[in-house]
C-alpha cells in the first residue's frame, strides 16, 4: 500500500442555519454537510457533500445511539447484525485514495479478503467509511490526497486574501 495515514476519529461538519433575525436563537439549526477525518499523523481530512443519512448513521455508531423510528438504509444496516457479520468476515480495509480533478470528488478503494481471494471495489468514500465503521476495520487516507487537499486549501486562502468585500 502506498503511504497512507490511518483515520483515528470521525466527526460531522455542520452548517448553521440561522433564523429570520440572523442569530443563533433556539430556532437556528445545524445541518450536516460533511465529515472531518482525524488522522494518526495529526492532520485532518475533510469530505463535503456527504449524504445526511450517512452522517446520521455514523454518529449513531460513534455515540452508541439507538436507531430512529424512521430509518434510512444506513441506520438500518448499522444495527443489522447479520449484515455486519457478513461484512466483518470479508472486509479488510478502506483506503480513500483517488481524486478526480474534473468532478472534484474522492473515491475509496475497499479491500475484501475471503478464502485467499482478494477483491477491490471502488466506492463513494462516505459509504466505504460506513462499512468500515460498522465492522471496526481500518480506514486510511493516502498521502497524495492529503497533499491535494492542502494545495486546494492554500488556493482557497489565496483567493480570499485577494478579494474585496463591500
Image (tube, rainbow, N blue to C red):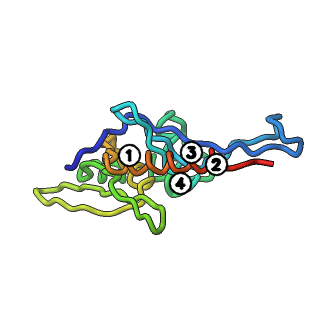
Q: Are marks 4 and 3 in contact (CB under 8 Å)?
A: no
Of the residues tagged 4 and 3, which is closer to the observer? 3
Q: CA distance from mark 2 to mark 3?
A: 9 Å
Residue 43's image quarter? top left
Residue 28's image quarter? top right
Q: Secondary structure at mark 3?
A: helix
Considering every residue shown, the one lying at the far left of the view is 116
Q: For this view, does 142 lie left or right of residue 17?
A: left
Mark 4 or mark 2: whose residue is earlier in sequence = 4
Q: Tell me the residue that label 4 is attached to.
A: 50
Residue shown at 39% from the left, 59% from the top? 99
Considering every residue shown, the one lying at the far bottom of the view is 102
Q: Are marks 3 and 1 in contact (CB under 8 Å)?
A: no
Mark 1 or mark 2: whose residue is earlier in sequence = 1
Mark 2 or mark 3: whose residue is earlier in sequence = 3
Q: CA distance from mark 1 to mark 2?
A: 25 Å
The image position of residue 41, as x and y in percent, is 34, 32
Q: Secondary structure at mark 2?
A: loop
Crowding at dot 2, Cα within 10 Å, few <14 / some 14-19 / many 20+, comes out as few
Q: Secondary structure at mark 1?
A: helix
Of the residues tagged 3 and 1, which is closer to the observer? 3
Mark 3 or mark 1: whose residue is earlier in sequence = 1
Q: Tell me the residue that label 1 is attached to.
A: 146
Q: Tell me the residue that label 2 is attached to.
A: 162
Amino acid at each position: 500500500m502506498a503511504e497512507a495515514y490511518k483515520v483515528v476519529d470521525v466527526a460531522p461538519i455542520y452548517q448553521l442555519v440561522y433564523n429570520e433575525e440572523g442569530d443563533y436563537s433556539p430556532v437556528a439549526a445545524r445541518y450536516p454537510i460533511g465529515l472531518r477525518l482525524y488522522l494518526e499523523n495529526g492532520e485532518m481530512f475533510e469530505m463535503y457533500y456527504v449524504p445526511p443519512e450517512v452522517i446520521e448513521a455514523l454518529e449513531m455508531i460513534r455515540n452508541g445511539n439507538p436507531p430512529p423510528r424512521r430509518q434510512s438504509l444506513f441506520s438500518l444496516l448499522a444495527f443489522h447484525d447479520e449484515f455486519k457479520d457478513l461484512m466483518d468476515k470479508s472486509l479488510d480495509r478502506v483506503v480513500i485514495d483517488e481524486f478526480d480533478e474534473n468532478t472534484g470528488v474522492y473515491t475509496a478503494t475497499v479491500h475484501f479478503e475471503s478464502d485467499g481471494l482478494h477483491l477491490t471495489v471502488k466506492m463513494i468514500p462516505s459509504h466505504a467509511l460506513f462499512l468500515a465503521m460498522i465492522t471496526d476495520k481500518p480506514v486510511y487516507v493516502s498521502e497524495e490526497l492529503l497533499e491535494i487537499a492542502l494545495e486546494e486549501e492554500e488556493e482557497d486562502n489565496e483567493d480570499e486574501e485577494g478579494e474585496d468585500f463591500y
